[in-house]
Amino acid sequence: MKPQSVIILALAVIAVNATLGTDVSTAVSTSEWSCLKSNSRVFTIIRGYQSVGRVDPNVVQNIKNARAGGQADVDVYIFPCVNCGNPAGQAEALVSAIKGQNYGMIWIDVEVYQWSSSLTSNQAFITTMANTLRNLGQHVGIYTSYYNWQSIVGLSWSGVSWAPLWYAHYDNNPSFSDFQAFGGWKSPAMKQYNGSSTICGVGVDLDWY
Ligand SMILES: *[C@@H]1O[C@H](CO)[C@@H](O)[C@H](O)[C@H]1NC(C)=O
């Protein structure tokens, strides 16, 4: 093959593999999910636990609606209540609330919001939450960004690098080309590339893998 053909083929493979999705924190109807799918948004991550310290009252219906609306992959994220303490209890409450629902992974949201000023205390919180989810048989992932990780646990802390990374960088570019390594992760699993979009009338963040 000529070098040029190889490059064209490589680009075609990249284009075919690009998968677009959303993450949401509000109630979304079946027809809205179906509209998102028509707009090439085929997977989603739904908020399952709120920073005020309770299971998101919309999570179960959102999972059902997302599946009914044809979303191919449906994950859940937990926005922890750090002030509430008891990270194990929060993880258990979410898993118990969505037991039997058709979802994939649970992502722990590690972003600047009411964390302790002690990095070690934040590290312990995240470790306990991740281990609890894993011990409950869940597929755990971490949602964060380079700067959030730096400020909350320190860039070099790699205590949960066994879990896949979903990183945020709002460059509006569905690509991993901007990825800077941190936290022991060599490569990311997913990127949130836009944090303030509206599609089909639904407020969404835009994700890609
Ligand atoms: C995110 O997407 C919206 C439209 O969906 C756009 O207006 C906005 O500029 C994007 N944000 C960034 C940081 O590019």
Image: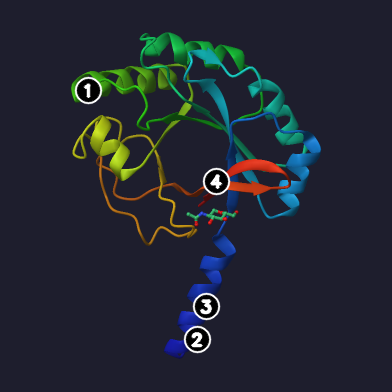
SS state under label 2: helix
Q: Say which residue label 2 marks.
A: 5
Residue on which disc 3 sits: 9
Q: Which residue is drawn at 38% across and 48% down?
A: 188
- Mark 4 packing: few (<14 Cα in 10 Å), some, or many (20+)? few
The answer for how far apart the CA atoms under marks 4 and 1 are is 28 Å
Of labels 1 and 2, earlier in sequence is: 2
| Residues under numbered marks 1 and 2 in contact, where contact means CB atoms less than 8 Å apart | no
Alpha carbon separation for disc pair 4 and 2: 38 Å
Label 1 with label 3: CB-CB less than 8 Å: no
Q: Do the residues labelled 2 and 3 touch (CB within 8 Å)?
A: yes
Mark 4–mark 1 contact, CB under 8 Å? Answer: no
User: Which mark is nearer the camera, 4 or 3?
Assistant: 4
Q: Earlier in the sequence, mark 4 or mark 2?
A: 2
SS at circle 3 = helix
Query: Which residue is denoted by mark 1 in the rendering?
Result: 117
Q: Report the Cα–Cα distance between label 4 and label 3.
A: 33 Å
Question: Circle 1 sits in a helix, a strand or a loop, which is it?
Answer: loop
Say whether mark 4 is within 8 Å of ligand 1.
yes
Could you tell me which secondary element the residue under label 4 belongs to? strand
For residue 196, which numbered disc appears in the image? 4
